[in-house]
Amino acid sequence: MKMTDKVVVITGGTHGLGKTLAELCLEHGARVIVCARDDENEGFAELEKRGIMAIKADVTKEGELRGLADMVVDRYGRIDIWINNAGIWLPHEPVEGVDWARAHDLMEVNLFGTVYGSKSALMRMREQGMGMIVNILSVSALEGRATSSAYCASKYAANGFTLSLRKEVEGTALRVLAVYPGGIKTELYDEKRPENYGEYMEPSFVAGKIVENLEKDVPEEDLIMRSNYK
């Protein structure tokens, strides 16, 4: 599916992978809408200058994402691709050192943000009879990792939701894809960079692989990209 004139919504799209992905989709001719919790930053103005619509919406609030979906359909008539990209991370700590109060917010964003975004998109896509939901997960959704228990748990939960949603739309023109990247060099790790941060992938590389997959006649349902992925 060529991206030309496709209506693409990306959550968490003002920085990191989301921003890079938004810019690349725009270069491929898509109409791009991004959202983020905070609109008081240079990211919104920079993207809007380039022709990307930036909307304030908190992925942990279902009503705000439903409103975003409604607004996009009101303006463009449809949603072709909805990418649940918003996510947060906690620095590596053994279980007894994890700030579990912060882990609640981690779960709200990484799991429920994916759930609410998928649900909001799905309601509109069922009406239009087509559409694609893409959930940006992590290789941490596939294997347990020492000192990353909270983050892995949030991504495992989001993965279980994604696989279940995929089964719910079987036999229809709706698709549910999952992306499992390894570490990416983004602001996500500014609080405390992992020791092997230098081995992480560039956002442009990951975004390129995602768009390349989306433009295939039959995209891979599960796109796995580890740090040494070629």
Image (tube, rainbow, N blue to C red):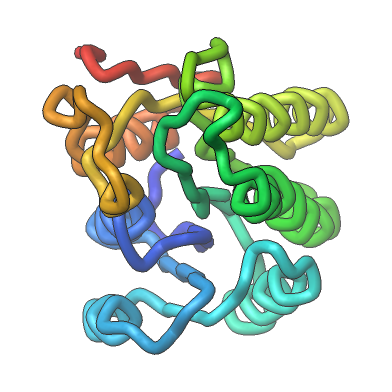
> On the image, which quarter does residue 43 sit in?
bottom left
Q: Can residue 219 be seen in the rendering of this structure?
A: no
Residue that appears at 79% across and 74% down = 63
Q: Can residue 98 be seen in the rendering of this structure?
A: yes
Q: Where residue 176 sits in the image (x, y, percent)?
A: 66, 33
Question: Is residue 80 placed above or below 171 in the rendered structure?
Answer: below
Residue that appears at 39% across and 50% down = 3
Q: Which residue lies furthest to the left in this view?
A: 198
* Circle count: 0
Residue that appears at 75% across and 48% down = 115
Residue that appears at 29% across and 44% down = 192
63 and 167: which one is in front?
Answer: 63
Q: Is residue 95 left or right of residue 119?
A: left
160 and 179: which one is in front?
Answer: 160
Question: Is residue 160 placed above or below 99 in the rendered structure?
Answer: above
1 and 60: which one is in front?
Answer: 60
49 and 113: which one is in front?
Answer: 113
Q: Where residue 90 sits in the image (x, y, percent)?
A: 47, 43
Q: In this view, does 229 lie to the left or right of 37?
A: left
Q: Where residue 18 sits in the image (x, y, percent)?
A: 38, 54
Image quadrant holding the C terminus, namely top left
Q: In this view, does 36 lie to the left or right of 116?
A: left
Q: In this view, does 162 lie to the left or right of 184?
A: right
Q: Where residue 96 sits in the image (x, y, percent)?
A: 59, 29
Question: Is residue 129 placed above or below 71 in the rendered structure?
Answer: above
